[in-house]
Amino acid sequence: MTARSHCPIASTLDLIGDRWTLLIIRDMLYMKKRRFDEFLESPEGISTNILSDRLRKLEEAELIEKQPYSSHSRRMDYQLTEKGKSLQPVLRSMIKWGLENLPATSIPSQQTQ
């Protein structure tokens, strides 16, 4: 990834600031999702081509790693790396801010802080 700026905020947003990336990480951290089909079940409705692209970018950025989970080489199990897990405080801050400032927000029962 080519940096458009040396600003840490701009560089972080270039990596995780799109509509879907943090939701994939949220699903991995809080809902324990690890497989492609599980990510597709999220209520936000990500499309398969966007999901494939974001998973590839997360792997290239070393935020996730994948391993085959069956004899079919295309079925992958995705797991956060330590670098990916280090985003948890960012998500916690976003959860806290959203709950305090966006009246229509709530935490789903399967999601924990």
Image (spheres, rainbow, N blue to C red):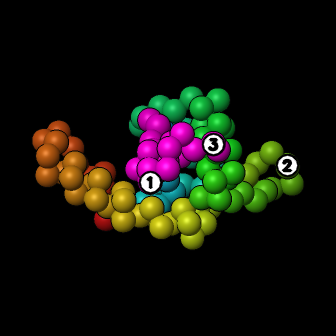
State the residue position of label 2: 72
Residue most extreme to the bottom: 82
Identify the magenta region: 1-19
The answer to whether residue 6 of the structure is visible from this angle is yes
Q: Does residue 58 sit above or below 102 in this rendering?
A: below
State the residue position of label 1: 8
Which of the two discs, 3 and 1, labels the residue nearer the N terminus? 3
State how far apart marks 1 and 2 are (Cα): 40 Å
Q: Secondary structure at mark 1?
A: helix
State the residue position of label 3: 2
Which of the 4 image quadrants contains residue 79? bottom right
Q: Disc 3 residue type?
A: Thr
Q: Is residue 11 left or right of residue 110?
A: right
Residue pictured at 73% horizontal, 52% vertical: 76
Q: Position of residue 61 (x, y in %)?
A: 63, 54
Label 2 with label 3: CB-CB less than 8 Å:
no
